[in-house]
Image (spheres, helix red, strand yellow):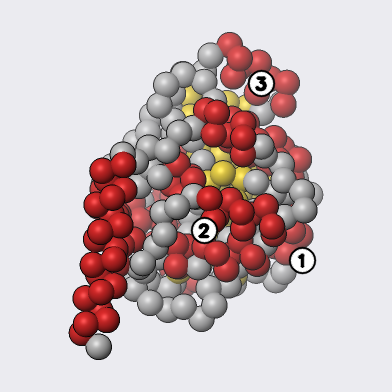
Amino acid sequence: MKSLCLYASYVEGIGVPYYSEVYVKELKNQFSKVMYLHSNLLDVKAKDFFEVQGIETKLLTNDGFDFGKWQKIIQDIDLNEYDQLALINDSCVLFASLDNVLDWFNHSDFDFGGLTISLVPKTHLQSYFLLFKKTTFNNLVYFFKSNKSTNNIHQVIADYEIGLSQYLLSKDFKSGSFLRNDHYKGEFSPYYQCVNSHIMQGSPMIKKKILFSSYRKEELFTLARMNFKLSVKPYLNLIVNCNQKLIISFDELFKHEKNRMSLFTLFKYHITRISIQLYRQFKK
């Protein structure tokens, strides 16, 4: 089977982060061809790394975010050469092998799949990790050709993340997710609501935001309403306890990546989260 993986990256500065090196090395173990789609310049060290790994790099503007990068490449290649396609972005830190995920998908009757699924506002696979079989390729190419790129993140989510799943489902393709949401059907993102359960179910990755506290300001109030805990250590402990073999060194990771939330912002978040919980208890 010949497979293609398009890994969309957005980082500031020059070079490639350690967590991306770990991720794309594992992708190279799983896919026939891996393309690293980036918006920043690569230094000599990064270029040497990709050459040694046999990974093709492509410098692209960040128009349309990850979907904009995927859109440009998909229109320039012949998907008919491949049997499987993966669309993956760099929003997660990969800490375990992808063997179980790929084995699940390859032995399923799904035409497309992902790690996690959301039902809000409409059923869709979350776009940080998507897999497609050849049956979907003609419709996939049509979808990307028919939609214009946008730099409005909310429009990207509506038109592309949600829109892609909805379009393929409307064509009677079957889809599935590797991880379950424990029957959660609430208003919040199942990723954050179910992150502990997902790790225990065998998720091989975790969002960078959780490890680096790199949340957008507008996200924090929603997370506070979810009663989401920002402390990193419990997630790291759970990952270590649930995985016999890690493919990443967290010590090495945190040498390069620091917590990006100020103590004042963290304090304000805790006050907001606790206040919301106390208000709910009072209302009962």
Residue at screen point 47% across, 62% down: 191
Q: Nearer the viewer, mark 2 or mark 1?
A: 1
Dot 2 crowding, Cα within 10 Å, few <14, some 14–19, many 20+: some
245 to 181, vertically: above or below:
above
Quarter of the image with the C terminus in it = bottom left
Residue at (46%, 19%) from the top-left corner? 14
Q: For residue 139, which numbered disc appears in the image?
A: 2
Any part of residue 151 in sight:
yes
Q: Is residue 135 above or below residue 32?
A: below
Label 3 secondary element? helix
Q: Residue at x 52, y 62 (%)?
A: 195
Please state the total of marks drawn on the protein image: 3
Q: Which residue does the numbered mark 3 point to in the structure image? A: 49
Q: Residue 93 or 3: which is nearer the viewer?
A: 93
Q: Mark 3, residues whose alpha carbon is within 10 Å: few (<14), some, or many (≥20)? A: some
- The one nearer the camera, 184 or 151, is 184
| Distance CA(mark 2)–CA(mark 1) | 22 Å
**How far is mark 3 from mark 1, CA to CA?**
33 Å
Residue 204 in percent (x, y) is at 65, 53
- Image spot of residue 155 (x, y percent): 28, 54
Query: What amino acid is found at the position of numbered circle 1 in the picture?
Result: His
Residue 115 in the image: state x and y as whole percent: 58, 60
**Residue assigned mark 1:** 107
> Going from the N terminus, do you reach mark 3 or mark 2 first?
3
Kind of residue indicated by mark 2: Asn
Q: Secondary structure at mark 1?
A: loop
**Residue 190 position within the rendered picture, expressed as x and y whole percent measured from the top left:** 45, 67
